[in-house]
Each structure stands twice: as structure tokens, then as C-alpha cells.
């Protein structure tokens, strides 16, 4: 296993790798045990949406060599109407966050199975914190 490095998305290939990792962690492709023990992703993004979101606020990656082994999607509130399942979340946020306060959603997070329980989530979080501080 190569060392893990953290970065922001800088290519379409990286976005495509995010989509592949996402597909591999949808509920319909996981066993009941995996669903309970490891979790799953809910939202299925398109390349177009991921690209537009990334242009507004770059997504955070964990990479081993050239392989994306984890990601944390960044979602600016400008995309609040793009994903139906997230609309209720934004309604709740609007109740407590005044409009003059700028914020960013640390969206969907996914880590490839061989890289779980190795601190990758913490690395993604720290990279996001540093990048958007």
C-alpha cells in the first residue's frame, strides 16, 4: 500500500474515480452485514453535478499513488436545490444559520474498504479544514 496523500480534486479522472467508489458503496451492491457494519452512501451524483460542485468548492481526496481511495464532497449552499434528498437538510439549516453567515457542507464521505480504520476520515477532515479555513 502506497502512502496516502490528501488533495483537492484537480482532474476529471479524479471525479470519475469518485463516481466509481460511490457506485461500489451504494446500498443495492452491499450485503446486509456491510450495510450495518460499514455504512453506505445515499446520493448518486452525476459527473456534471460533481464537476459544477467542484468548480465552486473543490472536493477533498485521499489518494494512494494515482488511485482515489477516499473522498469528502464539498457542497456549497448554492447547490441546495440540486439533490432532492438533501432539500429538507437545507430547510433545517436555514432555520438556525442566519443568511449572512457563510458556510460549506462536508457532504458525502466514502473510503475504499482496504483503507478504512486507518485514519483516512481524519485526514480528509483535516485537509478540508486547512483548505477552507
Image (cartoon, rainbow, N blue to C red):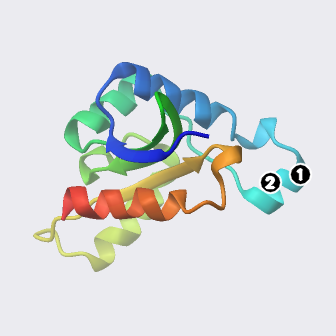
Neighbourhood count class around disc 1 (C-alpha, 10 Å): few under 14, some 14–19, many 20 upward: few
Q: Residue at x 30, y 79 (%)?
A: 96
Residue 6: % across, % down: 38, 48
Q: Kindly indicate whether the residue at mark 2 contacts the one at mark 1 (C-beta within 8 angstroms).
A: yes
Question: Please, which residue is most extreme toward the top here?
Answer: 13
Quickly name the residue at label 1: 32
Say which mark, if any, is on residue 3.
none
**Image quadrant containing the C terminus:** bottom left
Q: Residue at x 37, y 30 (%)?
A: 49
- Label 2 secondary element: helix
**Image quadrant containing the N terminus:** top right
- Label 1 secondary element: helix
Image quarter for residue 102? Answer: bottom left
Residue 11: % across, % down: 32, 24
Quickly name the residue at label 2: 35
- Seen in the image, is 76 located left or right of residue 88? left
- Seen in the image, is 17 located left or right of residue 127? right
Residue 55: % across, % down: 22, 34
User: Does residue 121 lie above or below 12 as drawn?
Assistant: below
Q: Residue at x 40, y 71 (%)?
A: 92
User: Does residue 68 lie above or below 91 as drawn?
Assistant: above
Amino acid at each position: 500500500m502506497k502512502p496516502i496523500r490528501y488533495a483537492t480534486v484537480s482532474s476529471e479522472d479524479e471525479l470519475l474515480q469518485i463516481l466509481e467508489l460511490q457506485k461500489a458503496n451504494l446500498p443495492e451492491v452491499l450485503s446486509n452485514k456491510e450495510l450495518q457494519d460499514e455504512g453506505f452512501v445515499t446520493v448518486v451524483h452525476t459527473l456534471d453535478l460533481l464537476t459544477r460542485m467542484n468548480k465552486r468548492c473543490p472536493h477533498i481526496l485521499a489518494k494512494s499513488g494515482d488511485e482515489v481511495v477516499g473522498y469528502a464532497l464539498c457542497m456549497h449552499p448554492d447547490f441546495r436545490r440540486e439533490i432532492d434528498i438533501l432539500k429538507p437538510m437545507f430547510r433545517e439549516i436555514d432555520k438556525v444559520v442566519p443568511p449572512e453567515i457563510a458556510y460549506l457542507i462536508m457532504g458525502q464521505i466514502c473510503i475504499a474498504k482496504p483503507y478504512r480504520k486507518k485514519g483516512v476520515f481524519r485526514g480528509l477532515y483535516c485537509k478540508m479544514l486547512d483548505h477552507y479555513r
